Each structure stands twice: as C-alpha cells, then as structure tokens.
Amino acid sequence: MNRDDMFDAIAAERGELADVLDGLDDAQWATQSLCSEWTVRDVAGHLVMPLITGPMTIARTVFRVRGNLARANVVSSRKVAVDHRDELPSLLRAHAESHFTPPFGGPEAPLTDLLVHGQDIRRPLGLTRGFDPARLRVALDFLSTRGAFAFGASRADVTWVATDLDWRSGRAGAPEIRGPAEAVLLARAGRRVALADLTGDGLARVSPSG
C-alpha cells in the first residue's frame, strides 16, 4: 500500500465502524471493551478525539495530568465520549477523510489504531467482520517495527506467523506463535484474549503464566 492507499483504507475503516456504532443500543455502548480503561463508547471517543480536538486543548490536558501522555489520552477520549455521546458515529463518518497522523507515525498508525480498536469494540459485542489482507499486512508490519512501542506491543523474543497471510516477523529460530492474522494483530497489540486463537511454543513467552 502506498500513502494514498492507506488514507483511503483509513476512510473506509472509519465509515465501516461508524455503521457498526450506529446500530448499538445503550447496553452495548456501555459494554467493557478489550481496553481495560474504556467502554465501547470510550473507545469510540478515542477514535474521534484527535479528529475534533485541537493541539492546544490536548496540550492543556497533558499539562493537567503532569505530562502523563497515557492518562491524557484516557481523559481526552472520555471527555469526547461524554460531550459528543450521541454524535460519535456521525463525527467518525464526517471526518473519515481526515489525514491526521500522530507524531510517532504516518498513516500506518491511524490505520492500525482503527483495526485494533475496531476489534476492541466488536469482539466483546460478539460482532464479526471480514478483513482486507492489505490493511492487515500494513498494521502487522507497523506493530513489528516502530509501532510496537507506541501501541504497547509485546516485545517477547518470538516469531509471529499469520496462517492466513504470507506474513511473519521475528528472529530466525525463535519460538513461533501462529494463527489468523486478526488474532496475531490483537495479541501483538497486547490483547491477551486473542492468545486463545493462537498456537505455538512461543505462547509461553507472552501468556500470563509465561
């Protein structure tokens, strides 16, 4: 994927997720997501937040939480979720074409964010989806390089192998973790629930008992 292709994929992912959010009832909005700090509504707020929040507002929030960027993200995302409670799907759709990228990455970062957080929402709600292999490949590559730190990805010395894509990442000879690309993506991004969908002798290095 080139840069333009990635922004097209980002717009498509935002639109597809907005369609999902449009159909949720109050109980689903309040469901705990795969993110420990966030409900489904909070995750949606997180995805909308950088699209509608100015840099000075974000900077003030960072100052208030004494430079804790992770905490600032939680606070800012929840504020958007509360302030725009009923508008989150329409805002995500209205800003689908935004070319926002965070300081730590290009379009690979928001595309990865959408793929991972989209599953943070869908999985607890029992919703399934199909994946564009090219989008998954971009996200998997991103989490295997500079994106690993920004997304809190596992840094265990293992080789990750997607069994439904021609994709692998890791040191030659390292223990392997194998499974569907979606599960590899989520596990690589620290979602332990996805480990149940994976196999291999490398699991002991990333599982809670390992």
Image (cartoon, rainbow, N blue to C red):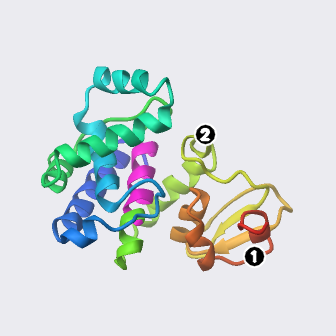
Confirm or deny contact between disc 2 and disc 1 (CB under 8 A): no
Identify the amino acid type marked 1.
Gly
> What residue is disc 1 on?
200
At mark 2, the secondary structure is: loop
Q: Inspect this view and state whether residue 165 appears.
A: no
Q: Is residue 80 above or below residue 19?
A: above
> What residue is disc 2 on?
146
Magenta stretch, main secondary structure, is helix
Q: Residues within 10 Å of mark 1 (few under 14, many from 20)?
A: some
At mark 1, the secondary structure is: loop
From the top left corner, tell me how far across and down residue 58 is, in percent: 34, 27
Numbered tag placed on residue 172 in the rendering = none
From the top left corner, tell me how far across and down residue 150 is, in percent: 55, 40
Q: What is the spatial separation of the Cα atoms under label 2 and label 1, in whole angstroms?
A: 25 Å
54 is within the stretch colored magenta = no
Name the residue rendered at 27%, 57% in the picture. Answer: 12
Q: Is residue 44 above or below residue 180?
A: above
Identify the amino acid type marked 2.
Arg
Name the residue rendered at 35%, 75% in the picture. Answer: 125
From the top left corner, tell me how far across and down residue 56 is, in percent: 30, 20
Name the residue rendered at 40%, 64% in the picture. Answer: 33
The stretch of residues the image draws in magenta is: 107-119
Q: On the rendered structure, is 165 left or right of 52?
A: right
Name the residue rendered at 41%, 65% in the picture. Answer: 119
From the top left corner, tell me how far across and down residue 113 is, in percent: 42, 50
